[in-house]
């Protein structure tokens, strides 16, 4: 028997294509640039922000921001890491959908001075809605630390459901932290009353 007959045909995983620019009522979500490094460093030097993120060290400085931005801006990754910007293109946070271990994961953070204004819900709904149009059969995984109920509420309002609990290492806290795993199944995004600009 020929070895050719035993080889499985290669199946190429579907990819969403290049990260878009997404405009919502109050925000523009756009690909990052290296010039975003100072704003990212300023936001992530705040322990109130980084303590809720698993992979961000503390302290965090401009070089850390550049180290993250270089591969992100190279165009070589399939991920959608988008800068959350307000008026005058001011960088106030990040929302991303990235491929990790064969699954698409949602992550996000916002500069603390923009909390409690509904910006994060608007940004997350915007990226998921666009991603789901390109990848309609794809579940989106996420999760929150157990001591971050606001983030869990945000996800639940958008249609995410809890699927597990465990512990993961948090670099900023330098310890294992209780973590709630969530998933948004295809077609389950709950509509938000957010006006999108063309």
Image: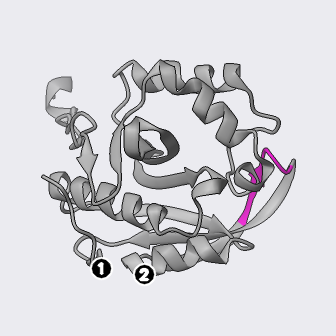
* Residue at 37%, 79% in the rendered image: 159
Decide: few, some or many residues near mark 1? Use Cα within 10 Å; few <14, some 14-19, many ≥20.
some
- The answer to whether residue 57 is left or right of residue 140 is right
* Picture disc at residue 157: 2
SS state under label 1: loop
* Residue at 49%, 20% in the rendered image: 35
Q: Is residue 30 above or below residue 162?
A: above
Q: Are marks 2 and 1 in contact (CB under 8 Å)?
A: yes
Q: Is residue 31 above or below residue 62?
A: below
Residue 86 position, x and y percent, is 41, 47
The magenta stretch spans which residues?
167-173
Measured Cα–Cα span from mark 2 to mark 1? 7 Å
Residue 124 position, x and y percent, is 40, 60
Q: Given the current orientation, which residue lies at the most extreme right position?
A: 174
SS state under label 2: helix
Q: Given the current orientation, which residue lies at the most extreme front position?
A: 88
* Picture disc at residue 190: 1
Decide: few, some or many residues near mark 2? Use Cα within 10 Å; few <14, some 14-19, many ≥20.
some
């Amino acid at each position: 028997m020929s070895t050719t007959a035993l080889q499985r045909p290669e199946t190429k995983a579907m990819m969403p294509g290049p990260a878009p620019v997404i405009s919502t009522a109050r925000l523009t979500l756009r690909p990052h640039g290296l010039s975003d490094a100072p704003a990212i460093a300023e936001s992530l030097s705040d322990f109130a922000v980084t303590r809720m993120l698993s992979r961000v060290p503390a302290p965090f400085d401009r070089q850390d921001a550049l180290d993250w931005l270089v591969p992100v801006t190279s165009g070589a990754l399939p991920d959608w890491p988008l800068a959350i910007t307000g008026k005058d293109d001011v960088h106030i946070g990040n929302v991303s959908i990235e491929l990790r271990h064969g699954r698409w994961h949602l992550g996000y953070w916002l500069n603390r001075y923009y909390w409690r204004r509904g910006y994060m819900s608007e940004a997350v709904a915007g990226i998921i809605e666009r991603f789901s149009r390109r990848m309609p059969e794809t579940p989106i995984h996420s999760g929150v630390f157990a001591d971050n109920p606001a983030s869990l509420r945000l996800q639940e309002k958008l249609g995410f459901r809890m699927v597990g609990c465990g512990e993961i290492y948090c670099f900023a806290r330098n310890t294992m932290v209780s973590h709630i795993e969530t998933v948004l199944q295809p077609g389950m995004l709950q509509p938000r009353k957010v006006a999108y600009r063309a």
